[in-house]
Amino acid sequence: MATGTGNTSADSPAALYGPVSLGLGIVALIAVALSGFVGIAVPLLAGSLAVTFGGLGLARGLHRGRSVIGLATGSLGVLYPILAVIAFAS
């Protein structure tokens, strides 16, 4: 952490919400692509965490672009397994 910069909001742990959301969203998309091997629990968990951290990142206003992309990829990671279960159940 830099000292004496005066910008404490960029040095706080809340500044990691956007990058963490983006990383978890990518993990969720990769897990969706490999859902035949890893099951549906991994994309659901990673996707829901990506949506949560993306929402927190948007609320804080830090790394908004990464938060939006993480929110979008995380929501795809959550919706795909749910829709797959609905499709295979009927």
Image: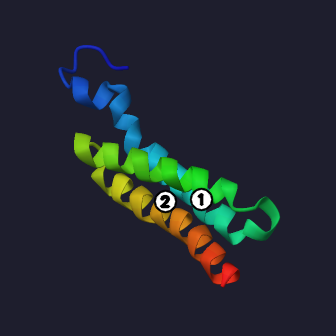
Up-down relation of residue 54 to residue 11 (above or below) = below
Give percent across and percent down for residue 21: 45, 49
Residue projecting furthest to the right: 37
Residue projecting furthest to the top: 4
Residue on which disc 2 sits: 74
Give percent across and percent down for residue 29: 59, 65
Which badge, 2 or 1, is on the more N-terminal residue? 1
For numbered disc 2, what is the local secondary structure? Answer: helix
Amino acid of disc 2: Gly
Judged left or right of residue 39, residue 25 is: left
For numbered disc 1, what is the local secondary structure? Answer: helix
Observer-nearest residue: 20 or 55? 55
| Residue that appears at 53% across and 56% down | 47
Judged left or right of residue 14, residue 28 is: right
Give percent across and percent down for residue 69: 40, 61
Q: Indicate the quadrant containing the N terminus: top left, top right, bottom left or bottom right.
A: top left
Answer whether residue 7 is visible to the viewer in this image: yes
Up-down relation of residue 64 to residue 8 (above or below) = below
Q: Residues within 10 Å of mark 2 (few under 14, many from 20)?
A: many
